[in-house]
Amino acid sequence: MQAITDKQGVKRYLIHITVNGDQYSPVIKANTLLVNLLRDGLDLTGTKKGCELGDCGSCTVLMDGKPVDSCLVLALEADGCEIITIEGVARHGELDRLQRAFIDNAAIQCGYCTPGMILSAKALLAGNPHPTEPEVRAAISGNLCRCTGYVNIVKAVLEAAEVKP
Amino acid sequence: MFLPDFDYHAPESLAEAIDLLARLGPSARVLAGGTDILVKMKNGLAAPAALVSLKNLHELRRIRWDADRGLVIGALATHNEICHSPVVQERFLSISEAAHKLANNQVRNRGTIGGNLVNAIPSADLPPILITLGASVTLAGADGSRTLPLEAFFTGVSCCALKPAGEILTEVAIPPQATTGSTYLKFGLRRSGALAVVGVAAAVTMEGDLVQDARICLGAVYRTPTRAVQAEKVLIGQRWTDDLLEQAGRTAVGCCLPISDIRGSAEYRRDLVRIYTRRALRRAITQGHG
């Protein structure tokens, strides 16, 4: 990995990362977290910051297809990886069936947990297109909704699973 | 939340990683999944001058069955990789289930078995089941590698046998078994993303109704994961009955020294130890390794 040390002695590293299909080569410090690279570096503020300790799931993104808390991943560790954020879920201006189902089922209240919920659900449906309700609940159990709108969220995911992709 | 500055290294081989750690000294820490060390750094509980990332050591990610050594799990295997591994599910569903009970899905996609062990938290979910199955760990350092029983690895709260100057836990081996059943039961305040208030693992060797051998390991109720040896003695050589399991549960209570904290009082934990020991034994006896 290429490193650059400036006159003040601060070291920065060049990484290559694919976000929502676009390739970026940012130069970052070692302590840059993936969530901060996404929000501050790439202006993708759909990924939210909540507890920043890996409990709440607000910052969930897909890293090589798997949901991870981007507050607990160094951006350096995502070098060479493919990241999907909430901005990458809709395609060609058309909402994903999960996004449509969240709207139709009023599964959004304050909306802060929604990006993470949708990405966790997206990973679930990719591996298990027809989940049961307990499987849906297990898949989103790392995402906290403090409006406690879980009933509609579960309904939305189950409904999205029935829609043909 | 602020993450302090540090130097970052991503060595390409185990030898290079060990060499780096020896050179950098105790102010350098190993970075595997990051789900513990980054939280500690954010909370000001650790301030390493350097992190040595193991992400390029792909050989430490393997999970395989070896006829002599048994189930060999590389230290960098994530909890979800262990949970979904066909070889783990086939041989020890109980380990797969324990990995699934840990933290939440996002953390399980990053956190590793090596990290879970070297952090040496009393409430960690993997040590009890691994200890009852007689697991050993391999530690690689500048002077070569050594193997020791996992039971002897934990030395205190957040303390383990890893030498501070550059040892790396490389793999966990679960030997071929005489045991006929094993299980890990956890009581947490939520099903997901919660630390164990009490965790109990049991492994048994049955011949019909006769308990030939039994191992019980308790989590979250002592400074380290701890064997309930007296409770094991209650069982060995006896025919199992509900009364016998209850007696073993009561004896296990005497083998722990729980604390009171935000998750539960010591008294509550002792009651849980009795009940979960009984349930874990019943499950290991009647349902095999899962």
Image (cartoon, coloured by chain):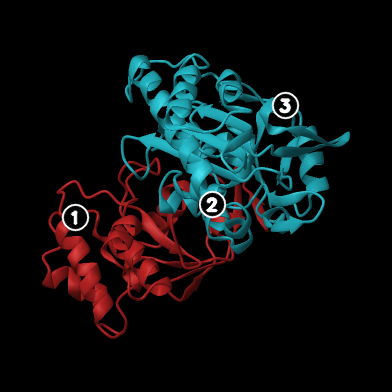
Task: Please give the chain letter of the residue carrying mark 3.
Answer: B
Q: Is residue A132 left or right of residue B74?
A: left
Residue beneath disc 3 = B164
Left of B261 or right of it: where is A24? right
Residues flagged by tags 3 and 2 on a common chain: yes
- The kind of residue tagged 1 is Tyr
Q: CA distance from mark 3 to mark 2?
A: 30 Å
**Identity, as a three-letter code, of the amino acid under mark 2:** Ser
Q: Chain of mark 1?
A: A
Q: Tag 2 or tag 3, which sits nearer the N-term?
A: 2
Q: Amino acid at mark 3?
A: Pro
Please indicate whether residue B281 sits to the left or right of residue B16 in the image: left
Q: Tell me which corner region of the image, top left, top right, bottom left or bottom right, holds residue B166.
A: top right
Q: Position of residue A27 (x, y in %)?
A: 55, 57
Location of mark 2 (residue): B96
User: What residue is rendered at 24% in x and 82% in y?
Assistant: A163
Q: Secondary structure at mark 3?
A: loop
Verify CB contact (< 8 Å) between mark 3 and mark 1: no
- Colour of chain A in the image: red
Residue under the image location 56 percent in, 34 percent down = B128
Query: Dot 1, crowdedness within 10 Å: few (<14), some or many (≥20)?
Result: some
Q: Quadrant of residue A88?
A: bottom left
Disc 2: CA contacts within 10 A as few (<14), some (14-19) or many (>=20): many
Q: Is residue B266 above or below residue A64?
A: above
Q: Which residue is mark 1?
A: A150
Which color has been applied to chain B in this rendered view?
cyan
Q: Are marks 3 and 2 in contact (CB under 8 Å)?
A: no
On screen, residue A15 above or below B266: below
